[in-house]
Image (cartoon, rainbow, N blue to C red):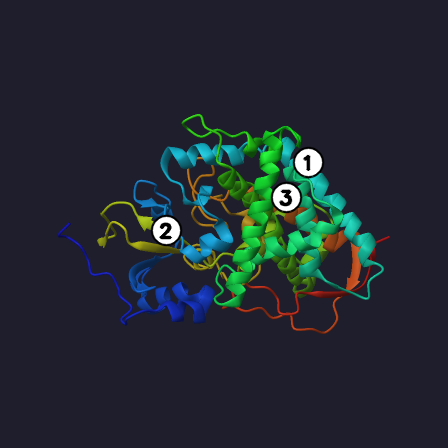
Amino acid sequence: MSNTNKMPIEEGIDHSFSLMREGYMYILNRRKSFNSDVFETRLLGKKAICMGGLEAAEIFYDTEKFKRKDAAPNRAVQTLFGKNGVQGLDGQAHKYRKEMFMSIMSPDGLEKLTSITEKQWEIALDKWKNMNKVILYEEAKEIMCKTACQWAGVPVEENEIKGLTKDLGAMFESAAAVGPAHWLGRNARNRVEQWIGELIDRVRDGKVTPPENTALHKFSWHRDLEGNLLDTETAAVEVINILRPIVAIAIFINFIALAVYHYPEERKKLETREEKYTQMFVQEVRRSYPFFPFVVALVKKDFIWKGYKFEEGTLTLLDVYGTNHDPKIWENPDVFNPDRFSKWEGSPFSFIPQGGGDYFMGHRCAGEWVTIEVMKVSLDFLTNQMEYEIPEQDLSFSMVSMPSIPHSKVELKNVKRRI
């Protein structure tokens, strides 16, 4: 490995604070200043490599070069991911566990999800027409919590929904937090893991019988490569890996409302309910607005890419937000333009709001199809099935806070059904 180039390096002892201070723009800012899609820095006291763009995504999702085990910071494991979940597996173990997730993403499964989502929006709309104001983000989380539980086969009483919604939301809202906010998310995860674990034990004891094609049923009875049932704690983590991401779609629902408000000319197109344009609009919301800032992995073994040496064990961050706004990939990337997706060729490495690569063999989010279908239903309600006013409020959103949510959480007034 003697024929290597010197990687651009961010000088200094540690840049963890800069990462927190700049949020979604941290990697992209340095890619621009270094005029390079890869650079070296120091995070949490250790050497790290940051990279972005189509080619970087392609190499990042090469499972021969990068691994996920032990890559996520411990605080993210304690709040966002949970221990021993699919996100931290590699090789055959990952492939086999991923198949468990993909088994519930069948056309029939997604059709059922769509039906449940529509029903929950109908119920919410009946409630909202009697409210003086609706805070969309909070209400959308509750819609998504009810949808997720019903689709996953998780029985939950109506009087438990608000508490469960709060706990599932705390897991992703606290992922980048420190201090009390971090502990809020950590305690929330502990509560939900214990509850789901007890539920799984009851399924295995024959005391609860969820529908066969639901996550609770399939994950409770899933066996690993050695033929053993997943331990209760791991099975609980994986059920939560269905519930939590669906609740997190509330973030995208807020940005849907924001886009519809800011681009009224797009709303007129959406009122035709043309399936292709609805899909394009949803994809552009996912591309344009901040969701995941980056994903992490560890270098699996020494290799050279573009003349740069990657050493085994080095923490590597892939710039998700920056890749979705890369001018080498997207024309006028900061312009909201759903029509761009009429020409998009579907590359698994150019458009990565929920990770890149292959669904079955790689680490692209298994729930991406779920996200798209739920967003399409939500978009139809916000454009075609309800009328509402958006009063003066702070609709700006931070590019530092992770996750980013409009500051007002999108307040709606005078909500009613469209006749």
- Residue 281 or residue 256, whichever sits in front: 256
Tell me the residue that label 1 is attached to: 112
Dot 2: within a 10 Å radius of its alpha carbon, few (fewer than 14), some, or many (20 or more) residues?
Answer: many
In the image, residue 37 lies at what x, y percent? 34, 59
In the image, residue 136 lies at what x, y percent? 70, 60
Tell me the residue that label 2 is attached to: 71
Q: Secondary structure at mark 3?
A: helix
Per the rendering, the mark at residue 373 is: 3
Q: Nearer the viewer, mark 3 or mark 1?
A: 1
The image shows residue 138, relative to residue 201, as above or below, that is below
Q: Seen in the image, is 5 located left or right of residue 150?
A: left
Residue at the spot x=27%, y=71% of the render?
A: 11
Does residue 334 appear in the picture of this structure? no
Residue at the spot x=55%, y=64% of the render?
A: 404
Amino acid type, label 1: Lys
Residue at the spot x=37%, y=67% of the render?
A: 16
Q: Nearer the viewer, mark 3 or mark 2?
A: 2
